Image (spheres, grey):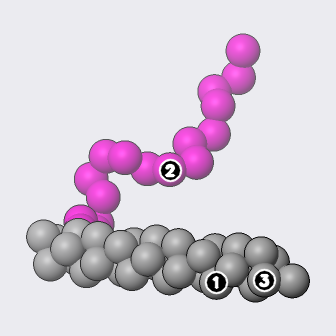
Amino acid sequence: MHKQLTLIETENASWQATDADKEAAKRGLAASRKALQEGRKRLADLLNAA
C-alpha cells in the first residue's frame, strides 16, 4: 500500500497555544454558549406567545 498523505503535521509544530490564548478561547466559547442559550429562550418565548 502506498504511503498515506499527512493532513496535519503533529511533530515540531511551529505554533503553540499559550495559556492566555486558551483562556481567551474559553471565554469566547462561554460567551457564544450564553448567547445561543438566550437566543433559544427568546425564540421559545416568541413561539409560545403566538
Q: Residue furthest left?
A: 19
Amino acid type of the residue that numbered disc 1 sits on in the rendered structure:
Arg
Front-lying residue, 19 or 50: 50
| Label placed on residue 8 | 2
The residue lying at 35 percent from left, 73 percent from top is 30
In three-dimensional space, the C-alpha distance between marks 3 and 2, rounded to whole angstroms, equals 49 Å
The residue lying at 50 percent from left, 50 percent from top is 8
Q: Residues within 10 Å of mark 3 (few under 14, many from 20)?
A: few
Mark 3 lies on residue: 49
Q: Is residue 23 visible?
A: yes
The residue range painted magenta reads 1-17
Q: Position of residue 2 (x, y in %)?
A: 70, 23
In three-dimensional space, the C-alpha distance between marks 1 and 3, rounded to whole angstroms, equals 11 Å
| Tag nearer the camera, 2 or 1 | 1
Look at the image and say whether residue 3 sits in the magenta stretch: yes
Q: Earlier in the sequence, mark 3 or mark 2?
A: 2
Please, what secondary structure does the residue beneath circle 2 have? loop
Q: Earlier in the sequence, mark 2 or mark 1?
A: 2
